[in-house]
Image (spheres, coloured by chain):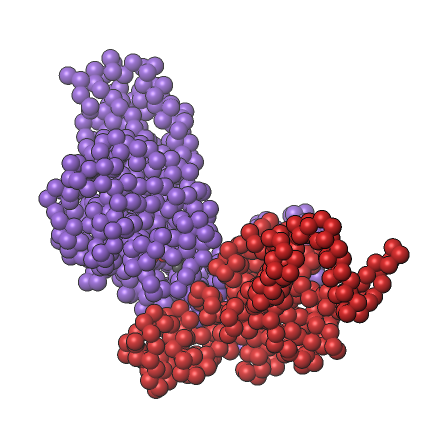
Chain colours: A red, B purple
Amino acid sequence: MITLIIDGKYVEVPEGATVLEAAREADIYIPTLCDDPRLEPFGACRLCLVQIKGMPRPVTACTTPAREGMEVTTTNDEIERIRRTIVELLLSDHPNDCMVCEKAGDCTLQELAYFYGLRENRFWGERRQYSKKDNNPFIERDMEKCVLCGKCVRVCEEVQGVSAIDFAYRGFRTIVAPAFEKDLNCEFCGQCVSVCPTGALVGKLSLGKGRQKDIKRVDTICPYCGCGCNITLHVSRNEIIRVTSSPDTLNEGWLCVKGRFGFKFVNHPDRLKRPLIRKNGRFEEVCWDEALDYVAERLKEIKERYGPDAIAGLSSARCTNEENYLFQKFMRAAVGTNNVDHCARY
Amino acid sequence: MKGKDIQIKVCMGTGGLAAGGETVLRAFRESLKEKGIDATVDRNCSIHQVGCRGFCARDVLVDVIIDGEKTTYQYIKPEMVPQIVEEHIIKGMPVEEWTVKDDYRQFHEKQVKVVLADCGEIDPEEIDSYIDRGGYEALRRALTEMTPEQIVNTIEASGLRGRGGAGFPTGLKWEYARKNPSEVKYIICNADEGDPGAFMDRSIIEGNPHSVIEGMIIGAYAIGAKKGYVYIRAEYPLAVKRLGIALEQARQRGFLGDDILGSGFSFDIKIKLGAGAFVCGEETALIASIEGKRGMPRAKPPFPVEKGLWGKPTVINNVETLANVPYIIRNGALWFAQYGTDKSKGTKVFALTGKVRNTGLIEVPMGITLREIIYEIGGGIEGDRRLKAVQTGGPSGGCIPAHLIDIPVDYENLTKVGSIVGSGGMVVMDETDCMVNIAKYFLEFTQAESCGKCVPCRIGTKRLLEILTRITEGRGRPGDIELLEVLSNDIKLGSLCGLGQTAPNPVLSTIKYFRDEYEAHIHEKRCPAGVCKNLLTYTILEEFCKGCTLCAKVCPAGAIVGERKQPHRIVQEICIKCGACFETCKFSAIKKG
Ligand SMILES: Cc1cc2nc3c(=O)[nH]c(=O)nc-3n(C[C@H](O)[C@H](O)[C@H](O)COP(=O)(O)O)c2cc1C
């Protein structure tokens, strides 16, 4: 363990921890835009600059390893002045259309502007303007709102191993883009959306579906597979408009395309809510008792006439382990066949 | 007796080639063959291509050396060659008219050539010509007589500091790497040279690639690296070609490869071509680029000597730094340390450009004054105008005003006045240069070359440039100077790498020394140097105008009106400020300002 002093407070952290991690450990707030504890440090936004005794210039807390006896100052006039300049610079190249932005109320840039009370801006000038729309089905990419924190690029490479996007061009024209600036064509896990601190990346399914303040959050488990990822349903006007996952869960906040974007079926008019039995060539809604009786009877008939091996059972990864256990037990013990399988049994 | 006693050396550096060096060389070959020289003068005559000798403005430069007596010709064209052969080589009478004059000697007088000692003397594509002048002697000594530790100590004792910009002590860097227990280490030669107007490293590689290679092998042995890279921009095709040839020849002679000179030490060098991004000269970006990633710097620590290429300890040195190494090992640390100042030893190569009479590549001892460089080596200001400032260190440097040109040129003193030695660009400016415009020029470069990673550099330099642009266009506002200062300081402190940390230097130094020029632009809407177009007005002075109508004829906008033999007048609303009338008027009747 290493002991260092942050703003006069003694903090103990394990070897290898960064100054930013140490500050968090001590509940000392340092603003950042590009840091995510789950990703490699990047040092791009420069908001986490701190002064360390003995160093000639401020350094970024996110990239600086904590050392024994280090004396860190996380805030002073100079540091706050630079941070303020950084936020102003970002806002000088931002649409600042919070009134219509999906992310309003959950946007780090907005929070920073609020924190620094930036109603006016000393800087103004050219703003990046991109008219091209990305026509992919899931992710709305508004690169005018991008602060180039690089989280999307890093999560795509480091966590997902896909590298569908990267930085392109130089200087003020730098942009995050898929290869050759084509439409995004990846596995659409949406991890990039989940880490974006601004409204640059949002799910297309939730566009215009409700402001952050109107949302009711419901924690649950993803029903798609046995992994059991923790998810949070964002519900507005009794409709699921978005799915997120918190970083402090079993799955560390990571989801796949199904868990993150596959929720439209919930409110879909075609969704099956009750059993159907085909009668006279047409499906008719029936109650569960009738449906179960019908199935039991038909299974019994087939078994008597053709033997148990004429029946096979296919279960689903969307069932729990317990349900799958019961299902195979039913097939083996009640039906009397080993013809049982499951879509996730590779 | 036939001997090697007539030598003809033709400059085939980039400057020499551009001026037609190749055709001159061919003309010599043909002319000598035609005249049957060997038979005629009964002597052995050889022709060599050599690298840059600095005074590129005088190319093609040709040396004719007869029995050790050297005559240098300037501005040589192929059609002049037969006469030189006839009169000088056959009859022994130099063609005086074409030889270099006093100013050429003056250009070289104050220079001290260490790194460039063999540049312009040897054939860069012929390893023997380097070996003949003592080349690879240092390597032999290093590998057979010295331990790695002794080498590091020698370099440390010499006081050699990095020539790539930051001036970090080379011996110390090598010592860190040497002490690192890692099995795998790398040495990289930084030949990215991205500063606009800089051509020192390129000229060294083009003129004497073996000195860099030899320096690298010695460095590799000292730190324990088995593999080296030269990161060189693809825009330097001649340097890349000559480096490739040199590497191959070095391999054939056993200076590279397994068990070098029977010492048991093995090492080889690979060339890695860069795509010409300025930021890729920054060491961590350079490493990323070699690894096949986008060239973006990362935060230090860890430094490359701890965690560099592929995560292994890596020494990165500049071309000129490495080219110094063989000479230090060959002649000793003390010999090297005799040149320079207390903390800045040795010599430094500069690319001298701008408004001086003699532009070109120069090598001077550290501690020489700017005055000596400008007025003695450079021959003074063109047209005897007044010196205004010297910009050193390229886009990361600053402008040093005329009243400070007696300071010694070394790392400490240039930093003290707000500039840097940097990689060695030196642009001389006179009273016709607008300092706001100069700052804008450098910001245009750094702004476009920012990698885009960190906010202060990406957006900050853009905003700096926009403010400078509006000032030069007459749209400056009160408070803009202060805004430039505040923003510049925040960019310097807030940026991730050296690019952003130094990009505001041209702005800050020009404000510091030429604030009145900024004020004139903003408050009086006037460009004192008469450079910023939007702030100029051309007017005709009635008392001088003879009504010759010449100005009206050349005016592309039809903005000049007047009767023949009557004073003319410029209609300001139509004038596009091209200056054509000003240049044309024979009676100095047009006023610019
Ligand atoms: C933006 C930027 C560009 C640089 N470009 C070069 C370059 O072109 N050549 C070079 O040798 N060093 C360059 N450097 C300096 C290198 O990062 C590094 O300090 C140097 O190569 C170390 O070698 P030295 O110790 O021999 O000087 C650059 C630095 C920065 C920040």
Figure quadrant, ligand 1: bottom left
User: Percent from the top left, x then y, of residue B107?
Assistant: 30, 46
In the picture, the quarter occupied by the C terminus of chain B is bottom right
Q: Residue at the location (80% across, 70% down)? A: A287
Residue farthest front in this picture: A304
Relative to A106, say whether B413 is above or below: above
Q: Nearer the viewer, residue A188 or A294?
A: A294
Residue B378: percent from left, percent from top:
34, 50
Q: Is residue A168 visible?
A: no
Work out whether residue A346 can be spotted.
yes
Q: Residue furthest left?
A: B145
Q: Nearer the viewer, residue B51 or A24?
A: A24
Vertical relation: B4 (above or below) A171: above
The picture quadrant where one finds residue A193 is bottom right
Q: Name the residue rendered at 30%, 76% in the picture.
A: A1
Q: Is residue B184 left or right of residue B2?
A: right
Please name whichever residue, A221 or B20, is drawn nearer the observer in this view of the structure. A221
Looking at this view, name the residue that lies furthest to the bottom. A8
Extreme residue in the right direction: A280
The answer to whether residue B558 is left or right of residue A145 is right
Measured from the top left, where is residue A92 in percent x and y? 59, 71
Q: Position of residue B221 (x, y in %)?
A: 20, 47
Q: Quadrant of residue B54?
A: top left
Viewport quadrant of the N terminus of chain B: top left
